[in-house]
Image (cartoon, rainbow, N blue to C red):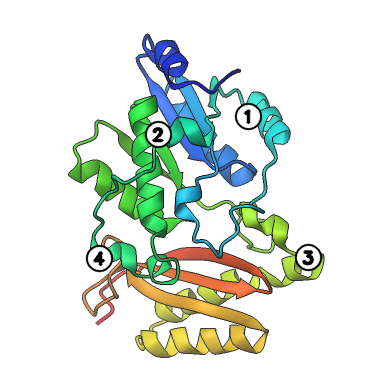
């Protein structure tokens, strides 16, 4: 496994490669990240993983400074996973000058996550576009846990005519249903046990929809109240069209239920896809 921090060195190394797969990460790796590496290796001969905590996607009051950084453990996991190249840039490498050029994003970027984290997706798409330009992969793999991010990256690639195939990795979970997340390390042992309730709430909505319940607003509000009664602070629980992430309508059969909520000082996100045999009606 090679560790490269310089853009020109990376480009020289990758120039002869005919099949490059890429997994962009912020480090503090876990089973979810490693599952994305496995997908990449199934579709590309050379696998590149980046480790970069992107300041641009953090608001001033968010956790940039305390975001977990576990570099040596990340190296060990990636080496064991058979990764070919780790791209390890510093901030000056990614942002050699103040980043005044940024994408104008669609309205979707201001909903769901974007409504609670203003500017988040501008920071995400900016760094992803820069990393794509640096690595120039043939495929890139993103996890479904960050569902809205995956959707926006796919749209960006399509609308900017980037020659990259975006693949999606399924959410990897603990036995209790809690999705693997770098921010899980913030949870206390008591909170970690309670944290699976977000997944349970999404499951509750999913089962009710598949059983025939069509009052989505009632399902969402009931699940929110139940979480709030357990001392969560819910940002949103929303059933949306899977392809557009707009609110679900009576004609839809492909849905995704997305949720974000605070447990103590930790904000967790999750989602579940729902496929119905016939439209909601």
Q: How many C-alpha atoms fall within 10 Å of the one at disc 4: few (<14), some, or many (≥20)?
A: few
The answer to whether the residues at label 4 and label 2 have Cβ atoms under 8 Å apart is: no
C-alpha separation, residue under disc 1 versus residue under disc 2: 19 Å
Vertical order, 157 against 85 (above or below): below
Residue 97: mark in rendering: none
Mark 3 or mark 1: whose residue is earlier in sequence: 1
Q: Going 34% across and 26% down the picture, which residue do you hit?
A: 136
Assign a secondary structure to mark 1.
helix
Q: How many C-alpha atoms fall within 10 Å of the one at disc 3: few (<14), some, or many (≥20)?
A: few
- Determine which quarter of the picture holds residue 176: bottom right
Q: Give the residue number, with chain letter if any, for mark 2.
A: 131
Q: Give the residue number, with chain letter if any, for mark 1.
A: 78
Mark 4 or mark 2: whose residue is earlier in sequence: 4
Depth order, front residue of 253/58: 58
Mark 4 or mark 3: whose residue is earlier in sequence: 4
Report whether residue 167 is seen: no
Depth order, front residue of 12/228: 12
104 horizontally vs 39: left or right: left
Front of the two marks 4 and 3: 4
Q: Give the residue number, with chain letter if any, for mark 4.
A: 107
The answer to whether the residues at label 4 and label 3 have Cβ atoms under 8 Å apart is: no
Q: Going 51% across and 37% down the picture, which residue do you hit?
A: 91
The answer to whether the residues at label 3 and label 1 have Cβ atoms under 8 Å apart is: no
- Determine which quarter of the picture holds residue 62: bottom right
Q: Percent from the top left, x then y, of residue 10?
A: 45, 18
The answer to whether the residues at label 1 and label 2 have Cβ atoms under 8 Å apart is: no
Assign a secondary structure to mark 3.
loop
Q: Give the residue number, with chain letter if any, for mark 3.
A: 188
């Amino acid at each position: 496994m090679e560790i490269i921090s310089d853009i020109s060195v990376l480009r020289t190394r990758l120039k002869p490669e005919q099949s490059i797969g890429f997994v962009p990460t912020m480090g503090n790796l876990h089973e979810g990240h490693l599952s994305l590496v496995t997908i990449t290796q199934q579709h590309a001969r050379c696998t590149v993983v980046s480790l970069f905590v992107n300041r641009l996607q953090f608001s001033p009051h968010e956790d940039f400074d305390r975001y977990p950084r576990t570099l040596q453990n990340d190296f060990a996991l990636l080496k064991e996973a058979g990764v070919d190249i780790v791209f390890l840039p510093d901030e000056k490498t990614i942002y050699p000058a103040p980043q005044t050029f940024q994408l104008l994003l669609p309205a979707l970027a201001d909903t769901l996550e974007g409504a609670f984290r203003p500017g988040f997706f501008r920071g995400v798409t900016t760094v992803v576009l820069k990393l794509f330009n640096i690595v120039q992969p043939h495929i890139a793999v993103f996890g479904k846990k960050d569902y809205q991010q995956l959707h926006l990256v796919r749209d960006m690639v399509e609308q900017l005519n980037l020659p990259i195939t975006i693949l999606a990795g399924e959410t990897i979970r603990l036995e209790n249903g809690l999705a693997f997340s770098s921010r899980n390390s913030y949870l206390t042992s008591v909170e970690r046990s309670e944290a699976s309730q977000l997944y349970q709430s999404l499951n509750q909505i999913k089962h009710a929809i598949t059983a025939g319940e069509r009052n989505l607003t009632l399902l969402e509000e009931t699940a929110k109240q139940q979480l709030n009664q357990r001392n969560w602070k819910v940002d949103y629980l929303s059933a949306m069209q899977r392809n557009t992430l707009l609110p679900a309508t009576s004609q839809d059969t492909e849905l995704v239920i997305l949720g974000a909520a605070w447990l103590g000082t930790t904000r967790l996100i999750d989602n579940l896809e729902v496929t119905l045999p016939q439209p909601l009606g």
